[in-house]
Structure formats: structure tokens, C-alpha cells
Image (cartoon, grey):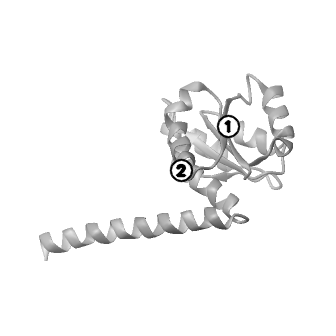
Amino acid sequence: MKKVAIIMGSDSDLPIVEKAIQVLKQYQVPFEVHVYSAHRTPEEARNFALNARKNNIGVIIAAAGKAAHLAGAIAANTTLPVIGIPIKSSTLDGLDALLSTVQMPSGVPVATVAIDGAENSAILAIQMLAINDEALCEKLEEAKKENERKVLEKNEKILEKYN
């Protein structure tokens, strides 16, 4: 199975990124985690992206706050799918990171999840890998059924209480 690479612009992003790590562990998807900055370590970030495919990476998740150019810088240097996680920082509540991540020029796509949306980034990465992995697809289907069961259970409690 291909790995998911998670790159964060700073180790201060780790509390958010750990949510993606937990999802990948839950689905038993192999992953690796790095700290590279689009601005402070541009060559390292570029080299990672250029070599990701030959290093058995299937999807890259890039988390960054503020200017949040990391996902775009990675996407500029690979043909692998890149998922951006805009990280909420002290300025603008993460809106700056969201806009920096989602507003990519034509030809350099970055799939972008919600501000601090690490869990969905991992699920999206798993869905991408599941295109060619039936066992992984089955795990995703089971998770959707479990989510449905939980919501219907909550509905029953509300119905009992108010109807």
C-alpha cells in the first residue's frame, strides 16, 4: 500500500496534525510525518515533493498556518494529489491560511479541507488510496455505516425526549 505523507510548516501545527495521524492509524494506512517550511526550508520541501512518488507516497497532506504556502509549494513540484489543511493561527482565525491554501492557480490543484480539518484530510487521503484498494474501501464503507448508526441513535434519543 502507498503511504500518506504529512508535512507541517511548523511543529506548532502538531496538535492539529495528530488528529490526521490518529485516523490513518485507525485505518492502518502507512504514513510518514515531516516538518518542512515553504519559506524557511524551500529546498527541502521541494526535494521531498520531487522524490515523493519514488518513495512510495500516494497522497500528501500539507498543514500550514498564516501565509500557508506549503501545500501549493508541494503541489508545484509533484503530480501526486496534495491535500491542504489550513491551520488557525492567532491572526485572522485561520482565514488567511484558508485563502492561501484554496486559491491555487490553474494547473496546480490543492484539495483543501476546513480550517483545522485534519480528520477530513486523512479520510480524503484514504479515499484516494481506496480507489485501487478494495480492503480500504470496505473499511470506509463500514465507517460510513457506523456514522449513520450513531446519528440515528441520537435521533431516537431526541424523539423520545421531545415527541
Q: Nearer the viewer, residue 55 or 17?
A: 55
Q: Residue at x 74, y 43 (%)?
A: 72
Q: Residues within 10 Å of mark 1 (few under 14, many from 20)?
A: few
Read off the residue under disc 2: 114
Q: Earlier in the sequence, mark 2 or mark 1?
A: 1
Q: Position of residue 96 (x, y in %)?
A: 58, 39
Q: CA distance from mark 2 to mark 1?
A: 22 Å
33 on left or right of 153: right
Residue at the bottom extreme of this rendering: 163
Q: Position of residue 35 (x, y in %)?
A: 67, 28
**In front here: 47 or 2?**
2
Give yes or no for contact between labels 2 and 1 (Cβ–Cβ under 8 Å).
Answer: no
On the image, the x and y values in percent for residue 70 come to: 71, 36
Q: Is residue 27 above or below residue 148?
A: above
Local crowd at mark 2 within 10 Å, few (<14), some, or many (≥20)? some
Q: Is residue 48 visible?
A: yes
Location of residue 69 with respect to 80 vertically, above or below: above
Q: Indicate which disc residue 32 carries.
A: 1
Q: Residue at x 31, y 72 (%)?
A: 152
Q: Residue at x 66, y 67 (%)?
A: 134
In the displayed structure image, the side of residue 147 where residue 97 appears, left or right: right
